Image (cartoon, rainbow, N blue to C red):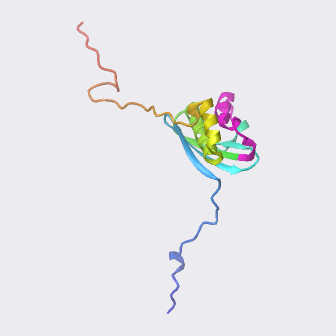
Amino acid sequence: MSTAQPASKTRKTSSRKKKGVGVLRGKRKEATARAYLNPGKGNLYYNGLALDAIPSAYVRQIITEPLRLTDGSKYDVYVTTHGGGSMGQAQAARVAIANLLVAHEGDELKAKMMEQDRSLLVEDSRRVEPKKFRGPGARARFTKSYR
């Protein structure tokens, strides 16, 4: 008798290598972003698009702010976002990229970013307050009219 298992029961190992030096996330309102960092030529890809393909210059400026504080030309950054609106996604991407660069570069860059803008590294903890019972919203109350 052979001790080999049938072909259907064997598990294939993935030939795909994990990309990137690290993966970190950033959140803002309802938006979540994941950033991947690879050694490269300074390219930034946002939801599969090159940075130049993003129509809004203001969104491009928000996303690239952490890269301007360091030598961004030695890394390729890939960012994927979901949830929320376009500005929330851009700010979530900004937080994810900043935290990824700090994790890779060290405490010197962290001090520089904290001096520049604390919201680069710290996620905004504000969330939507839940609706309460017997009311139309979280804080709003029904009004009473006598006439």
Residue 116 image offset from top left, x and y in percent: 63, 30
Closer to the camera in the image, 41 or 55:
41
Identified at 53% across, 36% down, the residue is: 122
Start-end of magenta stretch:
54-75
- The answer to if 67 sits in the magenta stretch is yes
Closer to the camera in the image, 25 or 146:
25
Q: Which residue lies furthest to the left in this view?
A: 146
The image quadrant that residue 45 belongs to is top right
Residue 146 seen in render: yes
Residue 79 seen in render: no
* Count of marks overlaid on the render: 0
Q: What secondary structure predominates along the stretch shown in magenta? A: helix
Q: In which quarter of the image is the C terminus?
A: top left
- The answer to if 66 sits in the magenta stretch is yes
Identified at 34% across, 23% down, the residue is: 139
Residue 52 image offset from top left, x and y in percent: 73, 36
Closer to the camera in the image, 147 or 113:
113
* In this rendering, position of residue 75 left or right of residue 30: right
Say if 103 sits above or below 144 in the image.
Answer: below
Identified at 64% across, 66% down, the residue is: 15
Residue 130 image offset from top left, x and y in percent: 36, 32
Residue 34 image offset from top left, x and y in percent: 57, 45
Identified at 60% across, 47% down, the residue is: 103
The image quadrant that residue 102 belongs to is top right
Q: Which residue lies furthest to the bottom in this view?
A: 1
